[in-house]
Image: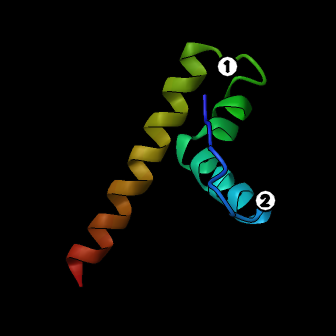
Amino acid sequence: MVEVKVRDGEQLERALRRFKKKWERAGILREVRRKAYYVKPSDEKRVERKKTMRRLARFARYDSN
């Protein structure tokens, strides 16, 4: 859980900005979106393989230059 303590004399907007940064770094929104619906393990593996192939192809293009 992300928690931010408001410092003495600190503006609320600044504390809210600190909270948002911590929240984004913790990856909470990404995790919620990922768990919003069920993905079959076989589909998940297929997507990961596809990402890996794209990444390797991109690296191969850079190496050839």
In the displayed structure image, the side of residue 24 where residue 16 appears, left or right: right
- Which of the marked residues, 2 or 1, is nearer the chain's N terminus? 2
What is the number of the mark on residue 61?
none
Work out which quarter of the rendered image holds the C terminus and state it.
bottom left
Dot 2 lies on which element?
A: helix
Of the residues shown, which amino acid type is indicated by label 2? Leu
Query: Is 43 placed above or below 62 here?
Result: above
Dot 1 lies on which element?
A: loop
In the displayed structure image, the side of residue 38 where residue 55 appears, left or right: left
Query: Is 52 placed above or below 36 here?
Result: below
In the image, 35 versus 51, the foreground residue is 35
Circles 2 and 1, Cβ within 8 Å, touching? The answer is no
**In which quadrant of the rendered view does residue 14 lie?**
bottom right
In the image, 19 versus 44, the foreground residue is 19
x, y percentage for residue 17?
Answer: 69, 61
Residue holding disc 1: 39
Query: Is 15 placed above or below 40 here?
Result: below
Residue at point 69%, 57% (across, down):
15
